[in-house]
Amino acid sequence: MLMIKCRLYFIFGVIIAIHFLLLLPLNPLKNISCADASQLRLSKGLMCEDIFENAPRNPTIVFSIDQKKAVCFSSFDDVPQKTVIYHNWYHRDVPSAKIRLTLNPPRWSTYSSIQLRRTDIGPWRVEITDENDNVLGVLRFSVTD
Amino acid sequence: MENLFLFISTIRWQDFVDICLNSYILFRFYVLFRGTNVFRVLIGMTVLWFLQRIAISLGLIVTSWVVQGIVAVGAIIIIVVFRNEIRRVLQAKNLKSILWGFSYKSAITPIEIITDSVFEMAQRKCGALIVFPGKEDLSDAVQGGIPWRGLITKEMITSIFWPDNPVHDGAAIVQGDQIRVVGALLPLSHRDDLASHYGTRHRAALGLAETTDALVIVVSEERGDILVAKGNRLREIKQKQTLEENIQQHVGTAALKKGAVKKERLEITAAALLSIVFITGIWFSVSRGQDTLVSLNIPVDYMNRKPGTEIFDTSAKTVSLVLSGSGALVKSITPDQVGVRLDLSKTVIGPNLFSITSENISLPPGIILREVTPSQIEVLIDQTIKKELPVQIDWAGKLPEQLILVDSVTDPATVEVVGGKRILEKIVTLYTEKVLLDNLKGRGELTANLVLNPASLAIAPGFKDKVTIRYLIRNRE
């Protein structure tokens, strides 16, 4: 009888353990957020006209609206675990777009872009932040005629 | 009584000067032109002007136009017709006599000597022509003549008209106690109704009398008659007394006997008082006659702001004032005469409500405040802080297709700005003025001004309002 009880406790314990193991991946964001954002370091951040073969092409700080788009490229050398960063686009200090990007260990490069219109002419900046709004880097550029 | 004090309080020092100055100008006009036809015409013009004002107030449009036209034309006519008299007044007298001198008629014409001389010349049949000018200027009517300026004596008169004297055919012009001009040529009368025995001397006497207000005495060379020409009349004089009376009446010496100067002074004093009353009346009718309302939008001035604070916002930048006063005063209001000022010495950080009363508003004298909109202003006072802001270049223009701006930096990269806390909390970047790309190439350096927006912001001491920009341009891949 005691043996049966022990087996039942063991099975119950295994079920709970499995249950916890199954539950954890149900919320991946929570999993990613466990990463210590302060450890993230922006190794390279620049504005460019395009991405070609996963590398920035024609880095620049001035975009003509004829270019149609502006790209913000960011690269991280030491990504401890899967995490999330944001590219926050501001036109004359007014928020224009907030783009969520995922980083994977151990190193990861990612980019975001916006389509340029005539109304976008003027000074811009992109703030690269972690999930906790810690600013990892600021890139400044202008959109001209 | 209260109204009287209120009224007196609205009188400006400019009004007092205005009345005094114009009264004096009018008085000087009287002094300079009294007794002349110009003065009479000026009085006529003034009456016409009053008629015009009355016509306007009664709504007689055409009448007021007509009178206005007459006054306008009359002003030109006065200048043209009386130009000689005006010129005589302005040229003959020096500046002192024009501005404050008084010319009392002091020189008395020795009438008895003249009449004795005339009758003696008549007895000897010695022709003579003596002119006594009136108020009008004779310079246009009289031709030639030799200036004499000799005191009148019987011997002098008889010697001037002595037949062997070269100037005996001309006229002698008498002014005061002097013979001013001798041998003057007078205009001849063209009348047909003159007696046949009248010669050129008679026609000359009548010619001058007809065209001016002068009195001319003629002594006939052929008949020994004495005639006096005045206006259109040529009258024969038989007795000395009659001649004396004629001359006295013309030159006005009867008025210059004992007490005459005193009477003249009284007349001038009365004229001075009348000038003041007249101008004061005009001033009242013009400046206080009509009450006019005007609405002005006046910007609010803030004074005595506490150190370390600044105005973040106000519920109104300007206030609308409804003012009343006479039309002339209201029209003369200039923006710098009206002010709305709020004292910020007792404000606190945050919203402060001010009621706008007459104490906050400065108005020129004579202008009354009727209404203020808005009657209250909320002023949001902010704390002054410093904030270090990153500088960003505001690029503009376009690079050639093959070029690309790779990098740029500013020196300094950040600038400290002073301003209201509420404003600076929202500002995260300090932009430069627009920097044109069009002519840039390669690597270079330039300077650009910083743009402070809003204007209440200021660059902190120790920082410049310009930055140096270093740039790098390369060929596109």
Image (tube, coloured by chain):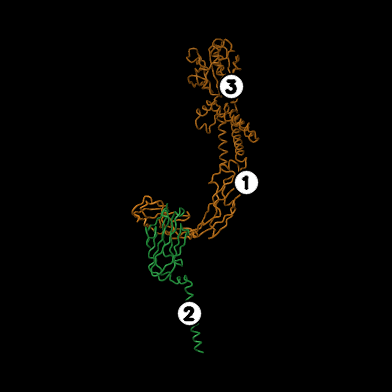
Chain colours: A green, B orange
Amino acid at circle 3: His
Q: Secondary structure at mark 3?
A: helix
Viewer-closest of B16 and B118: B16
Q: Which residue is mark 1?
A: B6
Question: Is label 1 on the same chain as label 2?
Answer: no
Q: Position of residue A119 (x, y in %)?
A: 47, 53
The answer to which of marks 3 and 1 sits earlier in the sequence is: 1
The circle on residue A17 is: 2
Q: Position of residue B358 (x, y in %)?
A: 59, 51
Q: Is residue B26 left or right of residue B164?
A: right
Q: Which residue is mark 3?
A: B250
Mark 3–mark 2 Cα distance, whole angstroms, equals 145 Å
Pinpoint the chain carrying mark 2: A
Residue B228 versus residue B96 in the image, above or below: above
Viewer-closest of A97 and B72: A97
Pinpoint the chain carrying mark 3: B
Q: Residue at x 49, y 87 (%)?
A: A6
Viewer-closest of A93 and B131: A93
Residue B218 versus residue B87 in the image, above or below: above
Q: Quarter of the image for the N terminus of chain B: give it.
A: top right
Q: Is residue A29 left or right of residue B39?
A: left
Question: Is label 3 on the same chain as label 1?
Answer: yes
